[in-house]
Image: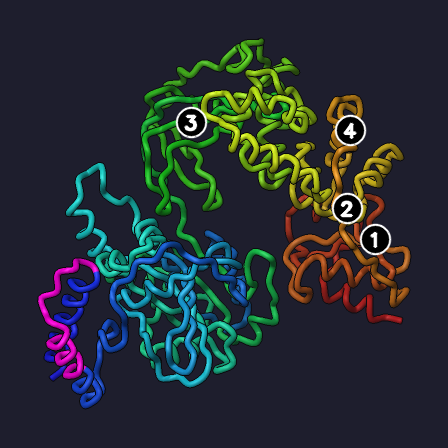
Amino acid sequence: MENKIIELTDYLNKCRDEYYNQSEPTLSDVEYDKMFDNLASLEKEHSFSLFNSPTKTVGCTVVSQLNKYTHKTALLSLDKTKLVSDIVKFMSDKILIAMLKLDGLTLCLEYNNGELIKGSTRGDGYVGSDVTFHMCKFKNVPMYIGYKGYLKVSGEAIIHQDDFDRINSKLADEGKYKTRRNLASGTLGSLDNKITEERCLYFYAYNLLENDITANKSDELRILKQLEFDVVGWVTIYGKSTIQNEINLLNEFALEKGIPIDGIVFTQNNIEYGLSLGSTNHHPLHSIAYKFPDIGVKTILTDVIWQVGRTGKITPVAIFDEVIIDNTEVRQASVHNVSILQKLELGIGDTISIIKSNMIIPQISENLTRSNTLIIPTVCPICDMPTTIRQDKDSKVLMCINSECSGQLLTKLNHFVSKNGMDIDGLSKATLEFLLEKGWINNFYDIYNLKSYKEEWSKCDGFGEKSVNKILNTIKESQNVKLENFIVALGIPNIGRTASKTISKYFKGKWLEFEQAIYDKFDFTVLEDFGYTMNDNIMNWHEIFATSQDIKLTYSLDFIVDEVKSLETTSKCLTGLSFVITGKLNAFTNRDEATNEIILNDGKVIGSVSSKCNYLVNNDISSTSGKNKSAKELGIPIISENELIKMMRED
């Protein structure tokens, strides 16, 4: 009788497609309803039904847009490593669960009293897209489960290799999809869920969010299986000596089943212990992802372009025939500086090997041809003025010595208007080039005088009154800015988003206090993670900025003052002591929490190891990091978090 149920399900789904999407129904409504009732009776009688049964799902749906959905529990990324030794260290004396790291799209499913009520993508971890209407078209997402109450499940949407090959076999070479992950992502971004059905998406569960059902990860995965979810492949690891073997076995299992993976996830089996480890803003500390070692992909170098940066540094960028690495298309890679260029002995037409450094940044790992025919330009590609090669620490870099080079200015302006800076939407790189050619902007300050050219600008090709007004309004809105964004926009060397936030927090979002501190020769190394180079860069930059037209800009901005409450000291046990914090934290949730505790005990946190430092806090005392080396050279004690906590408990 199960075969009869399967046959009826397939036939009625075919009829629904004809009715909803093709407007060519082969069954009358009466005939369809009769067969539908028959299927429902059979399912109830034999306690058997398919996930895509028409008694559980609705017809194919087309929507006008995907709505945003805010996750109550952030879906964070994972920390990554390519070293089995890191997994051994992570394990310590605990029991681990090793799971396939599926290479698909993270989804979150929510159920209430057994019924699926929401399906959403991960997005940036905090805000995703509502894709509930796609769920009924997955091959294996249960619309109903045997659980009363609220349940939230996360997992991965994937396309199996045989389905991927089948889809591509019907397409011309130029139209073939390149990666399964991109195809899955594009499918869920579609506004028509018929496509989801055609592309055979599967969902594999691996996590119960907001879990109060069980204490162990292994039991959690078994419960998901009992609730009729397909669960990611996993094993329990009791001893460190078996880790490499289990990695190999899980990899072989994925290959055999055609399941796309890009590593293995290791997580603490004891859920309460795992949660006690805390998390960073990027990843939880209860899990870590093992990524398979880099395997270089061969391709042909077709060109090298030279990009002029804000400081005049000219960076070589290798262009090559497209390759697929970690399911992403890669066509270019920075060569960083002249030293690396010369070491690789590059030449156009060389066969090169490409990897993703640190699993993120494409780079040339090897030049198999080594023709060494590439010529380093003697003039700037933008301004045609002479270049020079300078020594920058251990590397040689190519520099444009023309301080008025338009290439440098364009890069500076593009950085200034970026989202992390002044966030001026509409001033694209192409638009900035146009404004430079017109002579309407020569510095940051000129951007805020563009309204003077409104009438002429509106008559230019590619623009118009409406688009120009929109840009000018965005420019005006950007005059209300946080200090941290303004500092990022200014492009001070080595002062990025994190450092800018630290400055803004210290000076409570007030530009005048920050600027006065510079005039007073304030020591920025007292700020968290600030070293002498960053301090010098701020001072050197301000000497130029204070005499430029851009200084006028600060008078036309309304800085949004951050309300930062000062911490009141509750203990004097750390009075007169300065600490540097580095490395991973276990007892404290993050570095800010550790810093606050030190301040509450009348201590001080500084950014770099120097004679001003009394203790370096680092759980890895044997680390060979720069801060550990400096501490040992200066005779500064290196203490763990537990030792720090003990100091704070002493009266």
Give the mark nearer the N terminus: 3 vs 1: 3
Distance from the alpha carbon under mark 4 to that under mark 1:
28 Å
Residue bearing the label numbered 3: 318
Q: Which mark is residue 542?
A: 4
Residue 323 percent location from the top left of the image? 33, 37
Give the mark nearer the N terminus: 4 vs 1: 4
Callout 1: helix, strand or loop? strand
* Mark in the foreground, 1 or 2: 2
Say which amino acid is labelled 1: Ser
Distance from the alpha carbon under mark 4 to that under mark 2:
18 Å
From the viewer's side, name the closer residue of 355 and 317: 317
Distance from the alpha carbon under mark 3 to that under mark 1:
46 Å
Callout 2: helix, strand or loop? loop
Say which amino acid is labelled 3: Ala
| Picture quarter with the C terminus | bottom right
Give the mark nearer the N terminus: 1 vs 2: 2
Residue bearing the label numbered 1: 578
The span picked out in magenta is: 21-39
